[in-house]
């Protein structure tokens, strides 16, 4: 896990733990104060004050124990169960379904959703069930408890119950949730800004790599002008085309919004048209047939595949479709249900014998084609049923870092 993501998770956990501990302390102190209030002011002497006293003491103990075991889920579930039981008993003995203390049950649901969605759902369903049970026992024929709050203390008890519920919901939960939301929004804004900066830097890297490759291409072009040997000149031109095929990938990544993948049809179209102009001139008799759907490839796959297409098309233009003869170059790329790619590339030129292979020939182009297929972790075979030279290449997306091409 990235260090930054881990830090954000730790911060969110700390905020959640801080909220639970704060609520625990507040409810414990409130319970102990309510115990004293029930005994000395409200004159309630049965059940209710002792529920407050027991809850206050046990919850303080629960909160103190968290410092040792550091298990927030355990601490939350203990206080939730105690609050659920205590609030249910107090509600039953202070008017049942008409008791103002029943709103405390809703706070347990809020606390559940603050912790996790699953806990919120569990306590929501539990509370709905408890409220229905409280209502059912309030019916005269099923009632088994009585309101133990003295008649002249019920309004004050109701006031204190509502004040507690409103303050806990707004002053504690609301305030802390707003603070947590602000922190999340701030973190989101910072992450978006950093992502934008990263994308800008990556674009700049692609732009600079493209410029450097174009500089290498220009150097090769300048060098070839000073060489009289036609064979050496052709070798330099082939190297220049290979460099340009790589530069095109970086240029496309620089110009597009998606920095991870390129639209491969437009890339192949531009590459093939460039090779035709470069080798055959602007007024050639070459027909280009490209059948590629809306496929996007990452850079680790796009570059070796682009080099492979470059070699196959270059060989077709140089040795397959000779002189000014008419010719057709076909490039088809498809993807099956197993995420495996199928490249069919070839020409209708003169072809070459079956006995000539990358192992028996000194042709750098043939050797590169097979080495690039190996780099793509794929397979290649020639289709001898068609006129000219045709290759069928199967491969998958390359996810690891691109390895160097070896002759």
Image: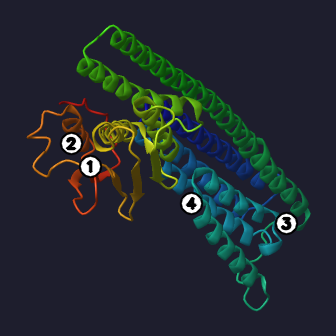
Q: Nearer the viewer, residue 95 or 227?
A: 227
Which residue is pictured at 53% across the width and 40% down the height?
13
Which residue is pictured at 38% across the width and 63% down the height?
336
Distance (Cα) linking label 3 and label 4: 36 Å
Which residue is pictured at 28% across the width and 60% down the height?
386
Distance (Cα) linking label 3 and label 1: 108 Å
Q: Is residue 224 visible?
A: yes
In the displayed orientation, state which residue is furthest to the top.
Answer: 226
Q: Select label 4 or label 2 by which is in front.
A: 2
Q: In the image, is 3 to the left or to the right of 28?
A: left
Q: Secondary structure at mark 1?
A: loop
Distance (Cα) linking label 2 and label 1: 21 Å
Q: Quadrant of residue 366?
A: top left
**Sequence-wise, which precedes: disc 2 or disc 1?**
1
Q: Is residue 90 above or below residue 10?
A: below
Q: Select label 3 or label 1 by which is in front.
A: 1
Please name the residue that numbered disc 3 is placed on.
150
């Amino acid at each position: 896990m990235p260090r930054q993501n881990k830090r954000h998770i730790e911060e969110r956990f700390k905020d959640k733990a801080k909220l639970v501990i704060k609520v625990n302390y507040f409810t414990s102190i409130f319970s102990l104060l309510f115990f004293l209030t029930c005994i000395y002011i409200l004159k309630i002497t049965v059940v209710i004050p002792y529920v407050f006293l027991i809850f206050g003491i046990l919850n303080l103990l629960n909160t103190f124990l968290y410092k040792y075991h550091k298990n927030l889920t355990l601490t939350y579930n203990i206080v939730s169960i105690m609050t659920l039981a205590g609030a249910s008993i107090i509600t039953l003995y202070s008017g049942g379904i008409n008791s103002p203390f029943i709103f405390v049950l809703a706070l347990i649901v809020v606390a559940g959703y603050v912790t996790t969605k699953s806990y919120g759902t569990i306590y929501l369903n539990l509370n709905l069930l408890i409220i229905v049970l409280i209502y059912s026992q309030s019916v005269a024929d099923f009632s088994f408890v009585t309101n133990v709050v003295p008649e002249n203390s019920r309004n004050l008890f109701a006031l204190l119950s509502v004040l507690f519920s409103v303050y806990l919901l707004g002053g504690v939960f609301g305030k802390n949730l707003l603070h947590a939301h602000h922190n999340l929004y701030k973190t989101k804004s910072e992450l978006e800004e950093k992502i934008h900066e990263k994308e800008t830097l990556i674009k700049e890297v692609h732009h600079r790599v493209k410029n450097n490759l174009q500089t290498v291409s220009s150097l090769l072009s300048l060098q070839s002008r000073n060489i009289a040997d036609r064979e050496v000149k052709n070798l330099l031109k082939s190297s220049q085309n290979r460099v340009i095929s790589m530069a095109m990938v970086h240029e496309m990544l620089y110009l597009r919004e998606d920095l991870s993948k390129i639209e491969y049809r437009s890339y192949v179209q531009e590459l093939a048209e460039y090779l035709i102009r470069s080798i055959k001139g602007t007024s050639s008799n070459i027909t280009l047939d490209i059948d590629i759907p809306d496929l996007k490839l990452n850079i680790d796959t796009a570059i070796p595949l682009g080099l492979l297409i470059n070699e196959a098309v270059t060989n077709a233009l140089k040795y397959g479709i000779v002189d000014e003869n008419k010719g057709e170059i076909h490039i088809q790329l498809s993807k099956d249900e197993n995420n495996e790619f199928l490249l069919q590339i070839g020409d209708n030129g003169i072809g070459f014998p079956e006995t000539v292979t990358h192992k028996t020939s000194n042709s750098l182009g043939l050797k590169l084609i097979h080495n690039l297929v190996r780099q793509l972790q794929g397979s290649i075979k020639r289709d001898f049923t068609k006129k000219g030279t045709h290759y069928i290449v199967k491969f998958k997306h390359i996810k690891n870092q691109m390895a160097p091409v070896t002759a």
